[in-house]
Amino acid sequence: MTLKDMKIKTFSLIEEYYPSLAGLAEDEDVLNKINGVVNQIQLDLMKLRKINGCKEIEITSEDNKTINLKEEINDLYQLRSINIDEDVEYSMPNEDIIVLPEDYIGTIKVYYYKYPKECKLIYEADESIDEYDSSFIFDLDLDILEIMPYGIAADLLKMDMISNYGKYFYERYLEMKNAIDSRRTSGMIVIDGGIDV
């Protein structure tokens, strides 16, 4: 799903969607803050179904053998596992640092959960907002993305005390979040050997 699709879904929910407008909505305040709200809701929802990441780090004889994972991997949320040759002994003084033997040369593979790609808060003067929004693809799973418009709408309308739509969308958002299964798969059964007849 693209950022443009997400905005259309959200604006349709809050009755702000006008297909004839270039900006998709009339309210400038909404248009100016929606990308920040989208980023905030993404960070909330990514915890429900984490995004897998993998990074290979080449280590040469000249490289420092103390590796700061936060510096090497800019979207690192949580570390899952590290794959290094079996006979290599390494240490991890904390979850962000790997200390390799001084003579180690090779490749380490880091498996991790990553932060989602965030959308821009400010567009360049010569940049087409429609092109950017149409090219921005979310990292989250589709069923998680279906919840996002409710969270975005709740945040955009939280100051609307008269209609109470913000409260309605927030309650719906929480209800949908609670129904999400955090697993990516339902598991697998392997039958080994079979039976004799």
Image (tube, helix red, strand yellow):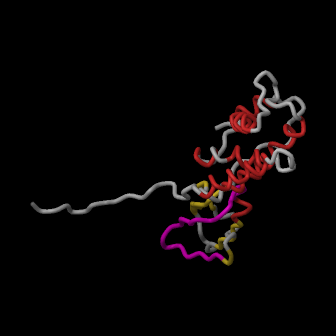
Q: Quadrant of residue 27?
A: top right
Residue closest to the eye, 126 or 161: 161
Residue closest to the eye, 116 or 27: 27
Q: Is residue 121 left or right of residue 79?
A: right
Q: Is residue 56 visible?
A: no
Residue at 78% x, 46% y is 165
- Horizontal and vertical percent position of residue 82: 57, 66
- Horizontal and vertical percent position of residue 31: 85, 37
Residue closest to the eye, 101 or 25: 25
Q: Is residue 46 left or right of residue 20?
A: left
Is 81 magenta? The answer is yes
- Horizontal and vertical percent position of residue 96: 69, 69
Q: Is residue 122 visible?
A: yes
Q: Quadrant of the N terminus?
A: top right
Q: Quadrant of the C terminus?
A: bottom left
Q: Quadrant of residue 163?
A: top right
Compared to residue 33, the image places residue 130 above or below, namely above
Residue at 68% x, 61% y is 77
Compared to residue 171, the image places residue 5 above or below, namely above
Compared to residue 161, the image places residue 76 above or below, namely below
**Residue farthest to the top?**
20
- Horizontal and vertical percent position of residue 162: 86, 46
Is 8 magenta? The answer is no
Residue at 86% x, 49% y is 161
The magenta span reads 73-92
Compared to residue 6, the image places residue 186 above or below, namely below
Q: Is residue 34 left or right of residue 100?
A: right
Residue at 65% x, 64% y is 78
